[in-house]
Image: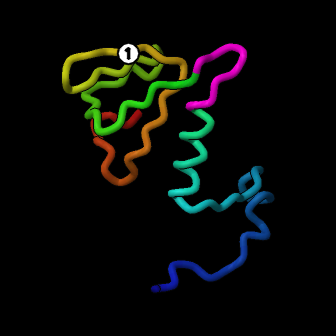
Amino acid sequence: MEESYRGSHDDFETKFKFPWYFSHRVNLHNKLKQLALESCSTSTGAKLHLSTPVVDVGYDEGILKFEDRTTVIKDVIIGADGIHINANLEH
């Protein structure tokens, strides 16, 4: 495996005012999924829309418009398609 970085992150918090955390992408996705699907006293959990192309996002209103012409309004939107994100949808 090719080394992608060697160095120290000791000054990260001083430089950026926040601590630096590292997580493998798969672990992060799994944890986000687990937390989203958990029920709590105020929610029955999220509905995941996998392999559902998004054609428009109303960031301020929390509106997602899908390729199949359906629309949802949500409090939180997490796009997890990495480098494949549609640049026209970036805020």
Residue 42 image offset from top left, x and y in percent: 68, 14
Residue drawn at (75%, 51%), measured in percent from left and top?
18
Q: Residue furthest left?
A: 68
Residue 5 image offset from top left, x and y in percent: 57, 79
Relative vertical location of residue 3 with respect to residue 22 in this rendering, above or below: below
- SS at mark 1? strand
Residue drawn at (65%, 61%), measured in percent from left and top?
22
Q: Which stretch is magenta?
A: 37-44
As drawn, is 59 to the left or to the right of 40? left
Relative vertical location of residue 78 with respect to residue 44 in this rendering, above or below: below
Q: Could you classify mark 1 by the number of other residues whose Cα lies within 10 Å: few (under 14), some (14-19), or many (20 or more)?
A: few
Residue ID for mark 1? 72
Residue 7 image offset from top left, x and y in percent: 67, 80
Q: Label 1 sits on what residue type?
A: Val
As drawn, is 65 to the left or to the right of 36? left
Residue 13 image offset from top left, x and y in percent: 78, 58
